[in-house]
Image: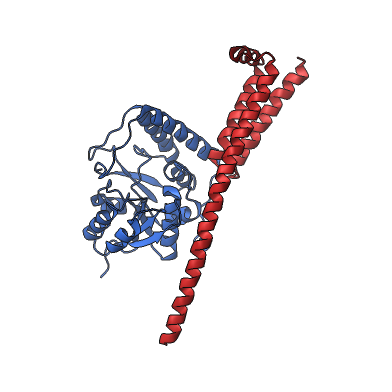
Chain colours: A red, B blue
Amino acid sequence: MTIATYLLGVFSALLTLGVVIEMLRRRRLRERHAVWWLLAGTLALLVGLFPDILGWAASLVGVAVPTNLIFFVSMAVLFLVSIQHSAELTDLETKTRVLAETAALQQLRIEELEKSIRKES
Amino acid sequence: MPSPFDGTLIVMPAFNEEEVVGNVVREVLGTFPGIHCLVVDDGSSDATSAEAAAAGAIVASLPFNLGVGGAMRVGFKYALEHGYANVIQIDSDGQHDPVGVPALIEQLETHDLVLGARFAGEGEYSVRGPRRWAMLMLSSILSRLAGTRLTDTTSGFRASGPRAVRLFAAHYPAEYLGDTVESLVIAARARLTVSQVAVAMRPRAGGRPSHNPFKAAIYLGRAVMALFIALLRPPVILPSEASTR
């Protein structure tokens, strides 16, 4: 591994972590959504700084080519985040529907109240 | 007839508390005649709203669960719109003894935010293990930030004065643990003065606090994370009196 690829690994991990933390800071990202990205960024940084960890982890779980472990872990993280997003989306759709129902029923109540007030006066 | 409780609103976030919320509201209204009490029904699926209304509380029902922080935001906005100067948050499960309320109000004359602290000598209340470490760590860091000794930073029994009500109506965090930890960080950084008063706590009427060490460890982790992120964020500035809405 050349010094250039080593630096590339470290800097891209730092960039990821930096972006996530800055978005958290500006409230563009909620804690619960940031956890996965923070985890992935930290792992990438560790492997970037100490590439030997990768070989050790690969032999530990019996993966012959260490790079394949990277692909496996990244796909697993992306897969989990994607599932979480689908679940959150479902949740949000339910909530918007409930809000729309509440708004419609309140509109109806207001109109009926206005009608009954007009009748009385 | 003016009473010392004019301009004070009791806010109780309630989630599925039909068994106790009625009695808690009646106790508060009975102990302090003339005080107003707002129950924010946080998307309960039981008769919480009906019980609270029958007991004489003003009830705001959320269409779905928003958590304590979300429910308190409704309370603060209601207080601001209806001209209440102070907001006192009390749990709807009967854990907080309302006799502590006058002490909190008295302290509001000199401070913006007053916490009812469970470990400051009165009443019986104890926690152990990682949950205790989490609480100790939170209190030591938040005490330094607020410039005063705070022993119970996760207390849900607290009083907010006019400045705090204005700040919280706009900036109260709805995140998990945000309502206790991050709200203190926001208040301290907006240069609000914080103080604490010892209050007696009763064991909860229903259910028992969990002592599962695994859950407690997760709580510790989330508390550290909530505090870390709250400290990273830029300070909020107290909105001026004219632009509160």
**Which residue in the rendered view is the most extreme toward the bottom?**
A121
Near-viewer residue (A98 or A110): A98
Q: Where does the image place residue B226, in percent across and percent down from the top left?
A: 48, 37
Q: Position of residue B39 (x, y in %)?
A: 35, 57
Judge whether A19 appears above or below B19 on screen: above
Position of residue B33 measured from the top left corner of the image (x, y, whole percent): 24, 63
Quadrant where the C terminus of chain A lies?
bottom left
- Which residue appears at 46% of the width and 34% of the height? B222
The image quarter in which residue B220 lies: top left
Q: Number of marks in the image?
A: 0
The image shows residue A38 at horizontal and vertical percentages of 59, 32
- From where the camera sits, is residue B56 visible? no
Q: Is residue B52 above or below residue B221?
A: below
Q: Quadrant of residue A118?
A: bottom left
Taking the image as drawn, is residue B139 in sight? yes
Q: Quadrant of the N terminus of chain A?
A: top right
Residue occupying the point 43% across, 48% down = B67
> Which residue is at a point 40% across and 33% down the rendered structure image?
B140
Residue B53 vs residue A71, the one in the foreground:
A71
Instruction: In this rendered view, identify the residue nearer to me: B67 or A6.
Output: B67
In this view, B64 is above or below A4 = below
